[in-house]
Image (cartoon, grey):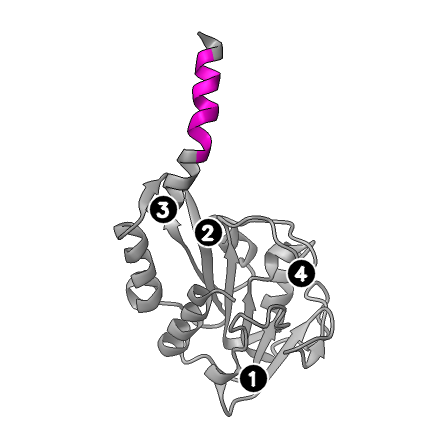
Amino acid sequence: MQPLVRAFVEDALELLGPPDPVVEFGSMQVEAAQEGDLRPLFAGRDYTGTDFREGPGVDRVEDLRALTLADDSVGTAICLETLEHCEDPLTACRELARVVRPGGVCLVSTPFLLGIHGYPSDFFRFTPEAMRSMLGGFDSVWAAGIGDPGAPQWVFAIAAQGRELDVSLERLPRLREAQERWDRAEGRVRVGPLRIPPGTLVKTLAAELPRLARERVRRR
């Protein structure tokens, strides 16, 4: 789990006071080096981690496309860095809307400007507008990207049943600061939607310039 994604959960906790029970969909902690366990943020609360296979962090095996959970049985659904790995994300979002009870919320994150990655497969990327559409089974939805408006690094969404959301980046201070850091690009070179350390850019140019020079000579 990327630090930005964890920061999103912390912001949502402080802003929304999401209710119990808490169910995480896609809770398997695949990479031990990453801080993927959200349980400390929900200490002492009714928390269940689910995934489509057994493994670290998984209390219950569930297929996000056909959940065995009852209607209106979840207070807070958490689905982070998971929908891009689901072969039918629209059905998955409908299932999330079905199980979240009135007054409950759903927290969703997906990468956008990120290379193909496994666990076990990587199928999709979603714009903020796509996220709002897929979560249309909820009564209120907020979604935004962090990074370049045309190619964000990450897309975050909060959806709610039976309550109206009052969410913006201004009310999510950690995400707001992440966007401000991206805008400032301190110590980095702006290249389209990327922010590249100068050393990396110099090494890349040093490797590429001879090839470009040879191509230019051939064209002449």
User: Is residue 82 visible in the rendered structure shown here?
Assistant: yes
Q: Residues within 10 Å of mark 3 (few under 14, many from 20)?
A: few
Give the amino acid type for the residue marked by disc 4 in the picture. Tyr
Mark found first going from the N terminus, 2 or 1: 1
Residue at mark 2: 128
- Distance, label 2 to label 4, CA atoms, is 23 Å
- Give the mark, 3 or 4, whose residue is nearer the N terminus: 4
Amino acid type at mark 3 = Gly
Q: Quadrant of residue 119?
A: bottom right
Q: Earlier in the sequence, mark 4 or mark 1?
A: 1
Disc 4 from disc 1: Cα separation: 26 Å
Report how many numbered discs are placed on residues in the image: 4
**Whether residue 105 is situated above or below residue 119 in the rendered picture:** below
SS label for mark 1 = loop
Residue farthest top in this picture: 220
The three-letter amino acid code for the residue at tag 1 is: Pro
Instruction: Provide the secondary structure element on which disc 4 rests.
Output: loop
The mark lying in front, picked from 3 and 2, is 3
Query: Viewed as shown, does residue 128 lie left or right of 176?
Result: right
- Label 2 – label 1 distance at C-alpha: 27 Å
What residue lies at 65% left-to-right and 56% top-to-bottom? 118
Q: Secondary structure at mark 2?
A: helix
Does residue 184 appear left or right of residue 50 in this picture?
A: left
Camera-side mark, 3 or 4:
3
